Amino acid sequence: MKTPVLETQRLILRPLRAEDAEEIYTNWGSNPEVARFMSWSTHANADVTREWLIGAEKNIEAEGIYEWGFVRKSDHKLIGSGGIYYKEIRGMYDLGYNIMKECWHQGYTSEAAARIVEFAVQELKQKYLYAYHAKDNPNSGKVMEKVGFRYIGDREYDSMDGTKHFEAKEYILKA
């Protein structure tokens, strides 16, 4: 299924595009505080962001990958991104998200995550989803719990470039 456009009360969730590179780089891709607990590292420049987005555009038609940009309806600003990614080893989708620092603690992440979960359960007919966060980032766990995930145990993860290692908490959502 092609990645659809989704809506919430305050957000439009739409597929990411290469032309979003400058806005993403400026709003959160270059911010070390946003990248601190992510599997990706801070983008060195907008070209790095663009390379990622070219891959994201190719995935719009792919099965098992649904990734959205979070656009605030009030001003059409791209404030974050997230999605679900099917993990064969788990036999379920993994939920992930990030949002620009200026939008932290305003409920946008929970709002977007809830809509993504609703899509996974209603449209993709998923019975289970999982997610995890760095132990040093408990606010991400609060988002997970708010949208229906329950803590199941500890794990570890590394950044994609191998420069960061995290102790983490893992969660499952049973639909």
Image: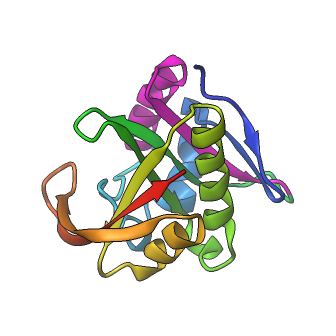
Residue 74 visible at all:
yes
Tell me the quarter of the picture where residue 37 sits: bottom left
Give the number of marks: 0
Residue displayed at 17% across by 50% down: 161
Residue 37 visible at all:
no
Give yes or no for residue 50 being in the magenta stretch.
yes
- Viewport quadrant of the N terminus: top right
Whole-percent x, y for residue 152 in the image: 31, 68
Tell me: 149 left or right of 164: right
Give yes or no for residue 33 being in the magenta stretch.
no
Whole-percent x, y for residue 39 in the image: 29, 56
Tell me: 50 left or right of 40: right
Residue displayed at 53% across by 17% down: 61
In this picture, is 105 found above or below 83? below
Colour scheme of the rendered structure: rainbow
Task: Give the magenta range.
Answer: 48-73
Residue displayed at 37% across by 40% down: 92
Residue displayed at 67% across by 66% down: 108
Whole-percent x, y for residue 120 in the image: 57, 40
Whole-percent x, y for residue 121 in the image: 59, 42
The front one of 36 and 50 is 36
The front one of 144 and 16 is 144
